[in-house]
């Protein structure tokens, strides 16, 4: 059973409001909390395209620092509500372009959470991710959606195998994490030992 059941009423109400009771999205958050968040223990994490910052709720229990970066004005405004439920001093939310933030803060983080974001990035941003950002981290988790119609790049990152190739080409070992969600896949990417 998910420890989401043990979350405060305020947290559950906020999650429910953001997700509008979409059971598939609740499953993604439960999967993340139960199977993925522990991998981020003691790391400095950047959540790329964090939306309302909901992944910070389970992460702030275990990371040394969480930074959520969101470009969309509406989602960024929602992070203020999420922030009310987090441990002070262990997180921050940044309004702006995630790739620009990552390339100007190399060394400030060692892990990435990429939740349904890579297929939105244009080719130039993916090139920066591969050449500047990924070499600076040792761990990443990638959630992706199958058959996404708004693809902005030529990498076809709605396919798990193409995400796998991107990370393997940057020196990561990649494995699947099973998720009970009809539209999502999840990959765990760890830097290969030297």
Image (cartoon, grey):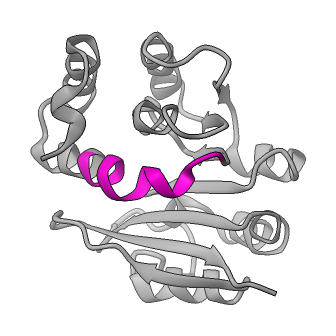
Q: Quadrant of the C terminus?
A: bottom right
Residue at the image point whose x is 24% and y is 47% from the top: 30
Q: Quadrant of residue 90?
A: top right
Instruction: Work out whether 48 lies above or below 90.
Output: below
Q: Position of residue 149 (x, y in %)?
A: 34, 67
Q: Position of residue 27 (x, y in %)?
A: 19, 50
Give the camera-side residue of 70 and 123: 70
Count of residue discs: 0
- Kindly identify the residue that appears in the image at 56 percent across and 74 percent down: 189
* Residue 2 drawn above or below residue 186: above
Q: Name the magenta segment's main secondary structure.
A: helix
Q: Is residue 17 left or right of residue 117?
A: left
**Residue 36: within the magenta?**
yes
**Residue 129: quadrant of the picture:** bottom right
Is residue 93 shown in magenta?
Answer: no
Which of 56 and 114 lies nearest the eye of the viewer? Answer: 56
Q: Is residue 142 left or right of residue 66?
A: left
Q: 90 and 18: which one is in front?
A: 90
Residue shown at 22% from the left, 38% from the top? 3
Q: Residue 46 placed where, x, y %?
A: 65, 45
Residue beneath the point at 51% across and 63% down: 141
Q: In this picture, which residue range is highlighted in magenta?
A: 30-42
Q: Is 32 above or below relative to 76? A: below
From this view, report whether residue 119 is shown above or below residue 71: below
Q: Where is residue 123, by image quadrant?
A: bottom right
| Left-right relation of 73 to 131 | left
From the viewer's perspective, tell me whether residue 58 is left or right of residue 168: left
């Amino acid at each position: 059973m998910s420890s989401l059941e043990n979350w405060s009423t305020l947290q559950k109400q906020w999650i429910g409001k953001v997700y509008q009771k979409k059971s598939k999205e609740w499953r993604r958050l439960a999967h993340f909390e139960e199977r993925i968040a522990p991998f981020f223990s003691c790391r400095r994490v950047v959540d790329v395209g964090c939306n309302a910052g909901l992944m910070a709720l389970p992460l702030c229990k275990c990371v040394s620092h969480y930074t959520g970066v969101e470009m969309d004005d509406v989602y960024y405004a929602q992070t203020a509500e999420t922030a009310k439920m987090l441990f002070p001093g262990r997180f921050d939310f940044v309004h702006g372009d995630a790739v620009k933030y990552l390339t100007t803060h190399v060394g400030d983080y060692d892990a990435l959470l990429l939740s349904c974001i890579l297929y939105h990035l244009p080719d130039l941003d993916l090139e920066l991710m591969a050449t500047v950002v990924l070499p600076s981290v040792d761990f990443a988790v990638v959630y992706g959606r199958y058959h996404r119609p708004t693809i902005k790049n030529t990498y076809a990152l709605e396919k798990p195998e193409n995400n796998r190739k991107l990370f393997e080409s940057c020196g990561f070992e990649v494995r699947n994490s099973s998720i009970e969600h009809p539209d999502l896949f999840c990959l765990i990417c760890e830097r290969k030992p030297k």
